[in-house]
Structure formats: C-alpha cells, structure tokens
Amino acid sequence: MRKFYPFQVNDIETFRLQLLALSDEVKHFCYLDSNHYSNYPYSTFGSFFAIDAIDVLSAKEHCLEQMHNFQKTHQDWMFGFLNYDLKNEIEPLAERQKQDFLQYPLLHFFIPKFLIKIENNKVEIGVQEQHQINEFDQLLSAVSLDNTLKTTAAIFLKNRTSKIEYLNIIEKIKNHIQQGDIYEMNYCMEFYAENTIIHPTQVFSKLNQLSKAPFTSFFKNDNNFLLCASPERFLKRQQNNLISQPIKGTRRRTNIEDIDQALKLELFNNEKERSENVMIVDLVRNDFSKIAIQQSVNVEELFGIYSFEQVHQMISTISCAIPSACTFADIINATFPMGSMTGAPKIAAMKLIEQYEPMKRSLYSGAVGYISPKGNFDFNVVIRSILYNRSHQYVSVQAGSAITIESDAENEYEECLLKANAMLLALEAR
C-alpha cells in the first residue's frame, strides 16, 4: 500500500523545476498542474508529479480489456493517456491510410515509483516503502537544472494543409451539413517540423508561462513527449458521479480592459457559439445516458464564460450518477472520444474527420490524467499542446474548430491560428 509522508521544501518553485528536471533521468514521467484555477468548477488538486515506474501498460490492441486487468492487478495511483485513435476499438471505422510520425501507443499507463503532491504550499511524497524516500532524496540531490535553462533554437513549422486547401475543405464539410449528414464537425490542421531537436522541459516551462491552464500536463513515455496547456476537462469521476466540461466558443484576450470585457460579452451572446456549445452538451448528455442512473443526467452550467491567459472560452458542465459497479473501461466505452473534438452525431463526424484530415491526430484530442486507488479519476482534453517524438525528431502542433452551417471559413482558419499561437511562441516559431 502506498503511503504519503510530509516532505520538507524550502522553495516550492525551485522544487518544481527540480522535479521537472528529473524527467531527464527516467523513462516514465507525468506532471499535472491546475495552475491555481480554484474557481474552475470541480477543481480539487494543485500539482502531481509521477516519477519513474513500478509497472507499465502500453497497449496497441485490446486496450480497455488490458486496462481493466491492469487496474485489478494494481490498487494504486496510475497516470497515463488515451490516444484519439483508441476510438477505433470503441467504434470500428474504416481507416484511411495515414503516416504516423508520432507513434504513440493507443493507451499508456504507469504506476509511479515516487508520487509528489503539492497543494496549498504543502508537499507530500507517496511511496510504497518508506525507505524509498531516501532513494528519492538521492535522486533529487543529483539532478541538474541545466536542461530547464537550455534554449530551443527557433524552428520553422510547416502547415500540412495550405490555407486554400483548408478553405475548400470547410466548404465541403458545410455541404455535408447542408445535406444532413452531420450537424457539426471539429476539423483540425497540423503544424509540424521534421529533423528537429527541442528541449522538452524548457519548451514546456515557456508554454506554461504563456498559457497557464487548469489542465496543464507534461508527459514523457520514453522518447514520446506531451507538452500540454489544456483549459478543458474531458471527464472526472468522484465516487459515483461523473462530470464533463466541454468547451465550444473561443475569443482572444487583450490587455485593454474595456475591449477584453466586450469580447467576453460578445462570446456569451453569440448565437453561433451557443449553437455549437449546446450541440456538444446534448452529445455528452447522450453519452452519459448509456451508463447513468436513470434521470440523473444534469446540465449544471450552460454557456459559462471563463478567462485564461490567451483566450476566453465558453464552457458547460454536465454531470450524472453512475452505478458503483461501473468500471473505467465501461465509462470510456460510453464517452470516448469526447464530443467537443469530434462533432455531432459523433460517429458520422468521426467518419468525415477520417476522410478530410490528412494526418493522424495521435494523442492530440485524446486525454491525459490519473486514476486513484479507489477508482476516482480526472482527465483533460489534449488540446493547446505540443507533441514531440525525440527518436524521429518530429514536432507536431494541432489546432481545430467546430464547423457548423453558419461557419465562415476565413474566421475558422483565424481561430485555429489563435489557438496555436501559444505553442508556436513557446517553440519560438512565431
């Protein structure tokens, strides 16, 4: 059984940098940070650092079955991710052949050797054996902050889809909507760089400074890295309650207070954004109804406006009660992938995503998070992120927007650029 012990720290911010630098010493590492967004509904933790692995599950087939068995074997904290293409196990679709430069597994979880929890300036270390605290002390004392201070040379990111191609595809998607194939679809494009070396901890630190977000994460699986500044929660379980908080609706921030407030108000009143948001709320309600206790699905907040470093967002909160016997695999089967990153109806939208997007999304629009020993969990939506395969020296930044019949292709293109801005700045590519 893992136990938590108080851990004395003189300077918590320096300690965070030391912990982040430890990612260079281990194959498996996860850092989750809520960035002090205490006003975000259902925010319940400060920071987690999961360092090194006691056991690992990295699956490319029969993923949820393997995950179910992994959980039965380990009644412990686990940290990991769900790749967007896990969707093909849940809803088998005809896949278009696309090259996968990132090569992340479909599902990856690990049991950390050291688990550091930071909350309200209080630090605790969770270990299975008390003597491991001394081992952690030795590991920490040997760490160097050099890599966190290194700078990544400015890199050039190419857009896999030209602006002309993008505008043409949006019109094709709108034709599908006009014909009644779908109501809404999330279409994404990729900025990428090949033969490129970055220093992940340094780029992540810069991204987190630029875009402090309530679901920030740094994840390392050997040579695969995720640097994530996500504002969106996919799914949280608290005992027998599920919560989802889809985002649909974005406006830029500005330093001019009056204009910034006007942008917030315009977002709240915009009929197109409300239409997009409510479609996804209905989709989440439908997904929840597959596993929820009857009549327990509830929209707790509709069209909430929340402000972050770079953007204002429209966020709704949906909850439901589930039977205690409902497993993680049951819940993911019912809800994944998240509707905010697919569209409505979900399966029809996913088919068109497969048809029109030239790249594999990989971990982008998947989910990263943790599961507690009691089966509670919290997962983000992997957006506003940089994906990096160090073996292939491949960097990927993806961004998307919801396409409806009212969409203006030029505006949607500009929204994608706005969403990608912080990642491009972190990479010094803009």
Image: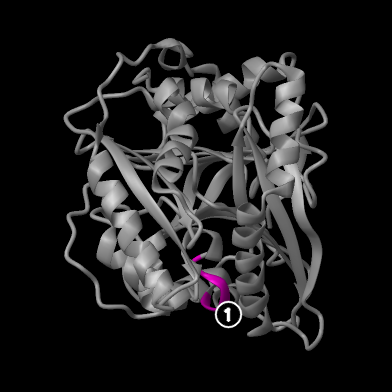
- Residue sitting at 22 percent across and 53 percent down? 100
Which colour assignment does the render follow? one colour
Tell me if I can see residue 241 in this picture. Answer: no
Q: What is the tally of numbered marks visible in this picture? A: 1
Q: Position of residue 259 (x, y in %)?
A: 71, 23
Check the image and report above or below for 274 versus 12: below
Residue 16: quadrant of the picture:
top right
Image check: 406 left or right of 331? left
In the image, what residue occupies the spot 38% across and 51% down? 188
User: Which residue position holds label 1?
Assistant: 330
Q: Residue at x 76, y 19 (%)?
A: 257
Main secondary-structure element of the magenta-colored stretch: helix
Is residue 246 visible to us here?
yes
Q: Is 20 displayed left or right of 187 in the figure? A: right
- Residue 336 among those drawn in magenta: yes
Residue 348 figure quarter: bottom left
What residue is at 47 percent from the left and 47 percent from the top? 53
Q: Is residue 235 left or right of residue 390?
A: right
- Percent coordinates x, y for residue 118 in the rendering: 73, 33
Q: Position of residue 311 (x, y in %)?
A: 61, 33
Residue 173 position, x and y percent, is 36, 63
Q: Is residue 118 above or below residue 239?
A: above
Answer above or below: position of 15 versus 225: above
Three-letter code, disc 1: Asp
Quarter containing the C terminus: top left
Asked whether 350 or 374 is in front, the reply is 350
Considering the numbered disc 1 on the image, is that residue within a helix, a strand or a loop? helix
Task: Please provide the residue range marked out in magenta.
Answer: 333-337
Is residue 104 positioned above or below 427 on the image? below
Pick whichever, 162 or 336, lies toward us. 162
Front-most of 203 and 186?
186
| Mark 1 residue crowding within 10 angstroms, few (<14) / some (14–19) / many (20+) | some
